[in-house]
Amino acid sequence: MRPRRAESPSLLISAAALCFLLLATPLLSAPAPEKVVWTPVSDALFRIDSKPAKFWTLYHAGKDKKEHRLLLQIGARYLMIDTQLRLIAEYDPAAFEKKGKEYEMPRDTKGLKALPTEDWILRDVGTSFLISTKLKEEGRLLEIQLPKLPDLRNVLW
């Protein structure tokens, strides 16, 4: 009987190439989108100094992993609210491009300036989530109520 011969070099090379492709696939996947798409938040409430604001829209980045960021448009002013860092930054209106009801913004856009804030309140108030803070320099109190989806997991059982 003849001793068995080692696997052919082409088979080993093919196996090595397959392993490399399987391991490198996450690295070769498509890069993150270069733009952030901001979609309007429906049924949100916004008040300035405990009075309803007239011209405003609240947006969130629908496919962004940072769900703690909101974009507030008050007239021609754009404020980015980061509830995790408790920070509000003002952005240049020219950085946003309107696409229907949504806005697009390059991901690497930097804010014009950070607005000093104080007295942050982040609280679950039953059917909504309350975000409240005071802009120090302007002396304005901003209040946002975001609606929560009801938890229906236990209703059907």
Image: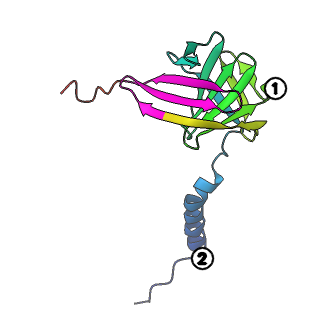
**Percent x, y for residue 83?**
55, 37
N-term-proximal mark, 1 vs 2: 2
Residue 90 falls in image quadrant:
top right
Q: Is residue 113 left or right of residue 16?
A: right
Q: Callout 2: 10 Å neighbours few (<14), some, many (20+)?
A: few
x 72%, y 15%: residue: 75
- Residue 140 location, quadrant: top right
For residue 58, which numbered disc appears in the image?
A: none
Amino acid at circle 1: Ala
The residue labelled by disc 2 is 9
Please identify the dominant SS of the magenta region.
Answer: strand
Question: Badge 1, how many Cα within 10 Å: few under 14, some, many 20+?
Answer: few
Q: Which percent across, then down, holds residue 151?
A: 32, 27
Pinpoint residue 153: horizontal percent, then vertical percent: 27, 29
User: Looking at the rendering, in which quadrant would you find the C terminus?
Assistant: top left
What residue sits right under mark 1 in the picture? 94
- The alpha-carbon separation of the residues under discs 1 and 2 comes to 59 Å
Let me know if residue 143 is in the magenta part: yes
Asked whether 21 or 61 is in front, the reply is 61
Secondary structure, mark 1, is: helix
Residue 81 placed where, x, y %? 62, 33
Q: Is residue 52 above or below residue 142?
A: above
Quarter of the N terminus within the rendering: bottom left
- Residue 69 located within the stretch drawn in magenta: no
Marks counted in the figure total 2
Region in magenta = 122-149
